[in-house]
């Protein structure tokens, strides 16, 4: 006998499971069977993170993994299902990513992935190095005792980091310290916009980060201590160029860029 208040036939009804009530292993186990079992598992919300930023990260990851390619249309309904969010933060994310040059919108047609190839990645990192170099050169022109001590602390953290995540966190603290102290509002906003092309997940998963990038932070710190603006600027530009080369090589190896080589 069916339970009171329920229709007698429940066999075809979708079973809804809140994935934030499941363990990581259980979510991974269920994932391949979601459609066969009729289960809709939803990505858990990240408390303390803006919903718009969750959408930005989600779209960037789709591009970086090759699940979205140049010219592909953004399926907003799919994002609603995947993230369990309303359309408001999705629209906010589309506006930001269009401003950052990652998406383009067409009237009454939706949002599409802009050109994403080797040339695009190289250009982004060239600009990113120049912008960070401006702030670093200003720092080298007039370094305060407080900022010098703070950068020394960051450098020690990077030197002693035992894993890639700890090293990258030290890098981000170092970069933010310089930019927030010496970049004006317009420059700071432009630098922050450029972070879309430097996703956290990508660099945390790059195992040679410390070996490849620590020398450039040593050079930048030495230039700042020596009041050498051009040396500090060069360290930022050279590091960004190396980052671009690494990203292009890694995405090509993963098959994300292989079919779309720049002329």
Image (spheres, rainbow, N blue to C red):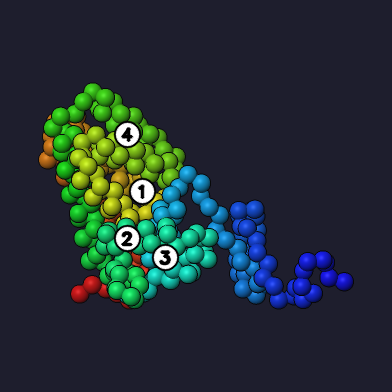
Disc on the earlier residue, 2 or 4: 2
Q: Residues within 10 Å of mark 4 (few under 14, many from 20)?
A: many
Tell me which numbered mark, 4 or 3, is placed earlier along the sequence.
3
Q: Is residue 196 above or below residue 168?
A: below
Residue beneath the point at 65% across and 55% down: 22
The residue wearing badge 2 is: 95
Q: Nearer the viewer, residue 89 or 60?
A: 89
Mark 3 or 2: in front is: 2
Of 91 and 157, which appears nearest the observer? 91
Q: Which mark is residue 62?
A: 3
Q: Residue at x 29, y 40 (%)?
A: 175
What residue is drawn where x is 34% and y is 38%?
173
Task: Give the Cα separation between the discs numbered 1 and 3.
Answer: 22 Å
Locate the C terminus by quadrant.
Answer: bottom left
- Which is closer to the viewer, label 2 or label 4? 2
**Could you say which quadrant of the image residue 95 lies in?**
bottom left
The mark closer to the camera, 4 or 3, is: 3
| Distance (Cα) linking label 2 and label 4 | 36 Å
Disc 1 and disc 2: Cα gap in Å?
Answer: 31 Å
Q: Is residue 112 above or below residue 225?
A: below
Which one is in front in this view, the residue at disc 1 or the one at disc 3? 3
Q: Which element is circle 4 on?
A: helix
Q: Is residue 219 visible?
A: no
Q: Which residue is mark 4?
A: 155
Residue 228 percent coordinates (x, y): 13, 34
- Report, in whole angstroms, how far the alpha carbon at label 4 lies from the one at label 1: 14 Å
């Amino acid at each position: 006998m069916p339970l009171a208040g329920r229709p007698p036939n429940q066999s075809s009804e979708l079973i809804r499971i809140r994935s934030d009530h499941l363990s990581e292993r259980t979510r991974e186990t269920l994932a391949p069977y979601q459609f066969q079992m009729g289960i809709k598992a939803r990505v858990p919300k990240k408390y303390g993170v803006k919903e718009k930023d969750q959408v930005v990260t989600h779209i960037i990851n789709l591009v970086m993994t090759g699940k979205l390619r140049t010219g592909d249309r953004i399926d907003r309904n799919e994002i609603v299902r995947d993230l369990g969010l309303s359309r408001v933060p999705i629209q906010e994310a589309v506006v930001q990513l269009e401003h950052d040059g990652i998406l383009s919108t067409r009237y009454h047609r939706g949002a599409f992935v802009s050109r994403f190839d080797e040339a695009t990645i190289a250009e982004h990192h060239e600009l990113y190095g120049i912008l960070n170099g401006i702030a670093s050169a200003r720092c080298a022109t007039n370094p305060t005792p407080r900022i010098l001590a703070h950068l020394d602390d960051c450098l020690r953290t990077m030197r002693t980091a035992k894993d890639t995540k700890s090293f990258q966190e030290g890098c981000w603290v170092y970069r933010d310290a310089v930019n927030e102290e010496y970049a004006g509002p317009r420059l700071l906003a432009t630098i922050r916009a450029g972070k879309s092309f430097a996703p956290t997940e990508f660099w945390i998963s790059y195992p040679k980060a410390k070996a490849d990038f620590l020398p450039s932070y040593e050079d930048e710190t030495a230039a700042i201590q020596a009041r050498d603006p051009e040396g500090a600027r060069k360290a930022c530009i050279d590091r960004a160029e190396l980052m671009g080369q690494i990203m292009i090589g890694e995405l090509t190896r993963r098959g994300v860029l292989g079919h779309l080589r720049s002329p």
